[in-house]
Amino acid sequence: MKTYLKSIKKSAALLGIAALLSLFSSCIKDNNNYVAPPVALVSVFQASKALPALDVYFNNNQVNWSPVTYQTGLAYIRAYTGLRTFNFYTYGEKGLLFSDTATLKANNAYSILLSGTPGKTDFILLKDTVNQPAAGKANIRFVDLSPDAPAVDLVLNDTVKVANKSYKGFSTFIPVTGDKLYTIKVRQQGTNTVLATLNNVTLNANLVYTIMLTGLSSGSSANNNALAINYVTNAYF
């Protein structure tokens, strides 16, 4: 199995590729006594338009090479286990914007999702279950990252797949038919009111995805903070 994060909004953006098994294990060939420390995998997705471009640190270790901007992020990164502090700085500067802590367990994968409004940043940590989909299937998870939207449903080709999620709410990974073209909609819960749409998305078999509602119900296209659907590819098999 391989894992990576690929962020797509309409035709935009990308992140990276990494092999999960090689990330979870490492060795030094010229030292037979070396024991690799336990590690977890951590990805980052930045869903707050209120934040500037970021530098990201795990404890004192910088983990980004280019700025982490709105609706982009970082592919899975190997991280030591235990209690870790995650620090976020304005890109290229030393001013700490905010930090948070989380306890990581060995051989687990996590997603850090940043959201919020001006003056308030929310740090959301999800454990990622990246099991191989059944034959001919893709697995998807939905996360609501819009601070001011009403409760929502995730709809694929006019079929409700995830119902009644509010801000910070998320589903488990669920199977859908793979290698199929979808129109993805987020509708106000229990209604036909469409809040955001993403057309012509192919969800490929043997891949694992996270679909997210980002932006603000009170936002606008002019300010680049309107409600939008983003998705990342967590893993492929």
Image (cartoon, rainbow, N blue to C red):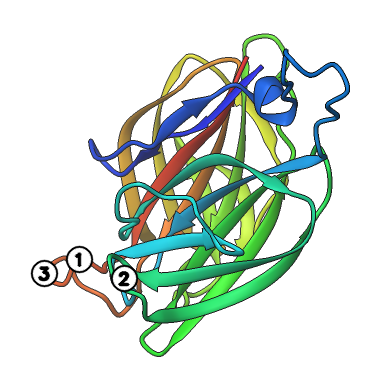
Q: Residue at x 47, y 26 (%)?
A: 17
Contact between labelled residues 1 and 2, with CB atoms less than 8 Å apart: yes
User: Disc 3 or 2, which lies upstream in sequence?
Assistant: 2
How far from the left and from the top, in percent, is residue 34? 83, 26
Near mark 1 (Cα within 10 A), the count class, few <14, some 14-19 or many ≥20, is few
Q: Marks 3 and 2, Cα distance to the nearest angstrom?
A: 13 Å
How far from the left and from the top, in percent, is residue 7? 38, 40
Assign a secondary structure to mark 1: loop
Contact between labelled residues 1 and 3, with CB atoms less than 8 Å apart: yes
The quarter holding residue 198 reads top left
Amino acid at dot 2? Lys
Q: Who is closer to the viewer here, 233 or 199?
A: 233
The image shows a total of numbered marks equal to 3
Q: Residue at x 35, y 56 (%)?
A: 68
Q: Residue at x 47, y 77 (%)?
A: 147
* Quadrant where the image shows the C terminus: top right
* Quadrant where the image shows the N terminus: top right
Q: Nearer the viewer, mark 2 or mark 1?
A: 2
Q: Residue at x 74, y 21 (%)?
A: 27
Compared with 20, 192 (above or below) is below
Q: Who is closer to the viewer here, 26 or 70?
A: 26
Compared with 148, 205 (above or below) is above
Residue 169 in sight from this viewpoint: no
Near mark 2 (Cα within 10 A), the count class, few <14, some 14-19 or many ≥20, is many
Residue 224's tag is 1
| Residue identifier under label 3 | 222
